[in-house]
Image: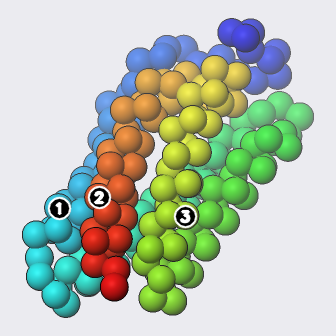
């Protein structure tokens, strides 16, 4: 399955560009810091940090859906059904998580975010292999996205521990 479709441009290198390192791992830092702070802080400050961290995670997931849409523009003959479904699924999951968090349902929002980021860690390397994403996604996403998953899992554990 290493064959690339003829209508998708080949990326020159699987090496992760330095800007992708900066803008790939940089947005994960607030998730890690937010999860650590939520565990360390008491009462109301904890709730505020939890909400802000989850909102950040929603924004990043919806941004990554936009990245997938942007990548579909380079497909000759137009975007594929898989590309559009992936983009809509990621965006919809991020948006539903945002609504859940804003509605005071952080547990539901966190679960949705775990699903969305979990999908990314699987789908982006597959997209890189098929030529629908830059080849470096196959190396970047498996290193980047587990940081979000770890942070979200820590927040989920905190929410479960706090549940009445």
Q: Position of residue 127 (x, y in %)?
A: 65, 30
* Dot placed on the residue nearer the N-terminal end, 2 or 3: 3
> Which label was assigned to residue 16?
none
Q: Which residue is mark 1?
A: 36
Q: Which residue is mark 2?
A: 154
Can I make out residue 66 in this image? Answer: yes
Q: Residue at x 17, y 68 (%)?
A: 39
Residue 55 placement: quadrant: bottom left
Look at the image and tell me whether residue 53 can be seen.
no
In the image, taking residue 14 as reference, residue 85 lies left or right, namely right
Q: Residue at x 11, y 82 (%)?
A: 42
- What residue did someone put label 3 on? 112
Q: Position of residue 45 (x, y in %)?
A: 17, 85
Dot 1 and dot 2 residues touching (CB under 8 Å): yes
Would you say the residues marked 2 and 3 are in contact, meaning their CB atoms lie under 8 Å apart? no
Position of 145 with respect to 63 (left or right) is: left
């Amino acid at each position: 399955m290493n064959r690339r479709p003829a209508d998708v441009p080949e990326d020159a290198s699987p090496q992760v560009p330095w800007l992708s390192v900066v803008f790939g791992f940089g947005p994960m830092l607030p998730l890690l810091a937010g999860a650590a702070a939520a565990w360390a802080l008491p009462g109301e400050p904890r709730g505020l940090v939890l909400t802000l961290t989850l909102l950040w995670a929603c924004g990043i997931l919806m941004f990554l859906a936009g990245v997938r849409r942007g990548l579909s523009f380079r497909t000759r003959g137009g975007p594929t059904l898989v590309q559009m479904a992936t983009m809509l699924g990621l965006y919809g999951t991020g948006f539903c998580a945002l609504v859940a968090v804003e509605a005071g349902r952080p547990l539901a929002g966190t679960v949705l975010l775990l699903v969305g980021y979990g999908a990314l860690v699987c789908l982006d390397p597959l997209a890189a292999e098929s030529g629908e994403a830059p080849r470096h996604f196959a190396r970047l996403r498996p290193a980047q996205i587990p940081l979000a998953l770890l942070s979200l899992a820590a927040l989920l554990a905190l929410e479960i521990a706090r549940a009445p």
